[in-house]
Image (spheres, coloured by chain):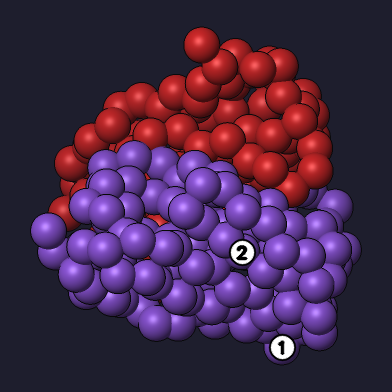
Chain colours: A red, B purple
Amino acid sequence: EAQVTQNPRYLITVTGKKLTVTCSQNMNHEYMSWYRQDPGLGLRQIYYSMNVEVTDKGDVPEGYKVSRKEKRNFPLILESPSPNQTSLYFCASSAGGARQYFGPGTRLTVL
Amino acid sequence: GQQLNQSPQSMFIQEGEDVSMNCTSSSIFNTWLWYKQDPGEGPVLLIALYKAGELTSNGRLTAQFGITRKDSFLNISASIPSDVGIYFCAGPPHNNAGNMLTFGGGTRLMVKP
């Protein structure tokens, strides 16, 4: 089954404790993205990747890092999480064009 | 960056009623997408529009690409309880180097059986 998977689905952590949210897709897509969803703001893009070793900032990249060492994986790294990064995070992949496939989401709470 | 304004922000309707929502932008979009997000899930693409004036249906859903290229509309006919969720409009910005999407703030639909 074609899908985008994310782990963990839920995470509660404390300020400053480094964390990684993994994302994997099995559709051989070149494009992958991370979004955060906050009430009333829709989804805002954090980082995107056009291919292995090619990443760039989206609209709200501050406080986040990404890497793309393999085509299927695109982890999101928070080196020093802060409470304003409490949000719902989505990974997405695409073969190009506008259509994107989204993962199930990771709900992160930073205390 | 470019912004998409969606309205209404939320709707509470009776089962069987028709629903209309829209999305506007201050700048031109060449593609309009409508996604639905079920509770606890990621967004799923409902309809994609690629040409100004285009009218496309997907079951009880109909979406239109505005002729000015600055707006789009989504209609749901004869709503049912499983229509509950958040509906997002989205589109790729002009210089879309990274396959980015700009999203509207969403319309939360609640359906009373």
Tell me how far mark 1 sits from mark 2, CA to CA: 19 Å
Tell me where residue B43 appears, x and y as whole percent: 46, 46
In the image: residue A84, left or right of residue A41? left
Residue under numbered circle 2:
B63
**Residue A21 at x, y = what percent?**
41, 32
Label 1 belongs to which residue? B26
- Residue ID at (30%, 70%): B17
Name the element at disc 2. Answer: strand
Q: Is residue A42 left or right of residue A72?
A: left
Q: Residue at x 85, y 52 (%)?
A: B97
On-image quarter of the C terminus of chain B = bottom left
Q: Amino acid at mark 2?
A: Ala
Q: Is residue A103 left or right of residue B56?
A: left
From the image, state whether disc 1 or disc 2 is nearer to you.
2
Q: Residues within 10 Å of mark 2 (few under 14, many from 20)?
A: many
Counting labels gives 2
Rendered view: B76 above or below A71: below
Label 1: chain letter: B
Residue found at x 74% / y 48%: A98
Picture quadrant where residue B66 is located: bottom right
